[in-house]
Image: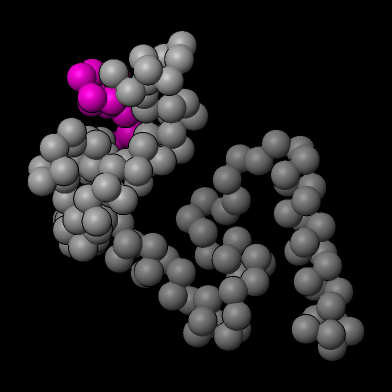
Amino acid sequence: MSLCCRALGCLLYQMCCLTHAFQGPNFLSVVMKIVEGDTPALPAAYSPDLNSVMRRMLQKQPTSRPTAAQILKSRFLEENMQKMKDRFVFVSSERGNSDAAAVAKHVDGGLPSLGPRPRLRFDSVLVDEGESERSGMS
């Protein structure tokens, strides 16, 4: 299971940094960085706790890496999963489904700052849902 967690650590790094955790001009140099290089860190914009979880996932020694269960039981993930659960529990109790309008209504601060195209797509989804509800097609 720790091999899977290493891959998950690489994915987490890539999602946060929008680049690979280990880079090189060819395959052999990438392998050498993985085997002998330093474990990368996330930019300072990310929390030290998230960085710690990611760095533990990228440990070179498989026995030093956490299992998926250990990661899920970490204080950082437990606290953040509880926050997400508390934030979105209204979806099932309010309307019985998780439509975009209900989610958007309850997200702190409204919608995130979206560019014109994503915002237009999101607005069209809300309009389409509203029209289908009025016509009884939901």
Q: Residue furthest front?
A: 28
13 part of magenta stretch: no
The image shows residue 53 at horizontal and vertical percentages of 22, 43
Residue shown at 60% from the left, 80% from the top: 97
Q: From the top left corner, tell me how far across and down residue 121 is, in percent.
A: 78, 51
- Which of the pair 134/121 is nearer the observer? 121
Q: Which residues are magenta?
A: 33-47
Viewport quadrant of the C terminus: bottom right
> Which residue is depicted at the point 33% across and 34% down?
46
The residue sitting at the left extreme is 63
Q: Residue at x 72, y 44 (%)?
A: 118
Residue 49, visible in the rendered structure:
no
In the image: residue 106, left or right of residue 31: right
Q: Along the line of sight, which residue is nearer the eye, 10 or 3?
A: 3
Q: Is residue 10 visible?
A: yes
Q: Residue furthest bottom?
A: 136
Q: Main secondary structure of the magenta part?
A: loop
